[in-house]
Image (tube, coloured by chain):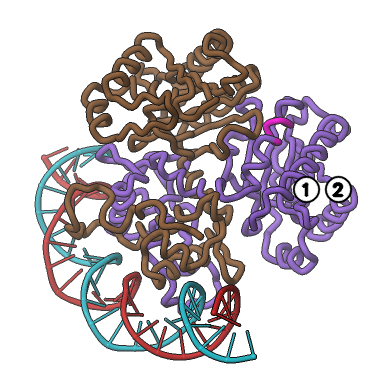
Chain colours: A purple, B brown, C cyan, D red
Amino acid sequence: MAETLHPAEVAKGAEGAVKDDADPNFMTSLARGLSVIRAFTEREPNLTIADIAKITGLPRAAARRCLLTLMQLGYAGSDGRTFFLKPKILALGYSFLSSAPLATILDPLIEQVSGAVQESCSAAVLDEDELVYIARAATKRIMSVGLNVGSRLPAYCTSMGRVLLAALPEAELDAYLARVVLKPFTERTIVAADPLRRELERVRERGFSLVDQELELGLRSIAVPIRAASGGVVAAVNVSAQAARVTCPEMEVQFLPRLLRAAEEARVLLVRSRGV
Amino acid sequence: MAETLHPAEVAKGAEGAVKDDADPNFMTSLARGLSVIRAFTEREPNLTIADIAKITGLPRAAARRCLLTLMQLGYAGSDGRTFFLKPKILALGYSFLSSAPLATILDPLIEQVSGAVQESCSAAVLDEDELVYIARAATKRIMSVGLNVGSRLPAYCTSMGRVLLAALPEAELDAYLARVVLKPFTERTIVAADPLRRELERVRERGFSLVDQELELGLRSIAVPIRAASGGVVAAVNVSAQAARVTCPEMEVQFLPRLLRAAEEARVLLVRSRGV
DNA sequence: TCGCCATGGCGCGATAATCGCACCATTATG
DNA sequence: CATAATGGTGCGATTATCGCGCCATGGCGA
């Protein structure tokens, strides 16, 4: 149980650049503690010290120290044998949400669209080559479980991801394409750089992205960009639905207008809330 | 700008118990790093090193090290002068959300109730004497801004808080009442222990809690407990509305039945998902 | 325009905080 | 019953972290 998973952002060095780390400004203990927090997942909400050690690659004693510290601070709890995260941990992630005007503003809009079209609706931004959900309204509990605020998906094969990629400066897109491996999630997934570039070009021209079962069979989604006052794309919103229930043309007809309206509304609201 | 706010869980010692016994299992650096994360709030999403130092009480150099570490790990960013949290920080809180069957299960139910009654609906649990939102569906952006997943409110003057307090074992309730100061948020807030006890007794008997403008004038809310298979109360769900629009009797008539139904549904779903 | 103060960056010596090995007790495992 | 794995602990080693102090920068007011 609990296999050695994510590469433990700590270990050698997340960035493969220089290996003679020894950066005097890098606090190893902090990095370790955070990696311990991230070791907890849906699959294994209750972990033992040994589990954590395996997952993070930390020595058992170190893992234990982190856990104990998190406990003392109220971020984790223990039933004696296993450890688990406590709700206080939300205070961390959500210092971001509450400090992000975006999430606050988009949330009600998302709800509104979702309620109107009776399908799941989300907002996301790009972070480290991935798509990160910052707001979400689900109609039913379905769809490849567990998409939540904070969830991360690849950008190249999702509608919101493509909208955001399409808005990237040329150079950054090049860098992205150079970095990322386009893994096929279904047989429809675009996995070659050139076709992807063309698709992004198309997204840019049409002002929205429609992705048909490229991430998961049976799942279609359509997304539009959210623009700030300045005109820059700051996020994306989408509606996703089961392919069996909604055809591609229907997605455009039924969902696109609402998405565009929400995006326009968001833009207006964003103007008023710019403390940045 | 950026006043000295929360007491910096690090400094002296969150628990007033023993003084500075230098627990060998406590990693100060980790605690400091986490307190830096929590220094970011809605009011000030962009903070300078000096700000952070003031807020957390850390020396400037230490604050700087934390910030730089968070940056290297991708949790924070900087525009050169000020720092801000990046979406990756959500991965921390998200470890909890995704590892909490509760949040996943309650979310769709919340949405459903919210959609049906056209008012904001939330779910919360108790954590360190406070109410913590674990799921939320807002209809409009209103109501004393920024209630989000992760938000914390006092338990004694909120409907969900009372539902959860009412479910506490006698001894724990005593301890709670001994610890907490009942601060009046409005002139209606119950601030004496005895009346509060009686109210909790009433909540226990009636199976729900209706709080009328005790947290904020113009705000009413009604909550019911969510019970696990075992019968223990594990969370609460509520509906809140503007007092001007919905009277107390109306709250009971219009919202209570739906809340009870959602709670019953949750109970059924919880039985099936108990991996704990 | 000229200083003044607050801030960010940096280096370093000091030291205490963290490390991780090694060992013991206890409990799953077979 | 034997074995392996886990949790807990202590300690010496060391190095990761600390925080003071200094310098450069720059915003701001006089």
Q: Is residue A110 magenta?
A: yes
Task: Answer above or below: position of A149 versus B58.
Answer: above
Q: Tell me which chain the residue with mark 1 is part of.
A: A
Question: Relative to residue B172, is residue A110 drawn left or right?
Answer: right
Which residue position is annotated with label 1? A225
Amino acid tagged 1: Pro
CA neighbours of label 1 inside 10 A, class few (<14), some (14 to 19), many (20+): many
| Residue B235 seen in the figure | no
Nearest to the observer: residue D5 or residue C1: C1
Task: Answer above or below: position of A51 versus A169.
Answer: above
Mark 2: which secondary structure? loop
What is the x, y in percent for residue A97? 56, 46
Q: Name the residue at 68% across, 41% down.
A: A106
Res A251 → quadrant: top right
Q: Name the residue at 53% across, 27% down.
A: B122
Amino acid tagged 2: Gly
| Residue A121 seen in the figure | yes
Question: Relative to residue B167, is residue A110 drawn left or right?
Answer: right
Res B209 → quadrant: top left
Q: Tell me which chain the residue with mark 2 is part of.
A: A
Q: Which residue range is magenta in the image?
A: A109-113
| Residues marked 1 and 2 touching at CB (< 8 Å) | yes
Which residue position is annotated with label 2? A207
What is the x, y in percent for residue A39? 43, 49
Q: Name the residue at 56% across, 50% down.
A: A99
Nearest to the observer: residue A183 or residue A105: A105
Q: How many marks?
A: 2
Instruction: Give the main secondary structure, helix, strand or loop, of the magenta stretch.
Output: helix
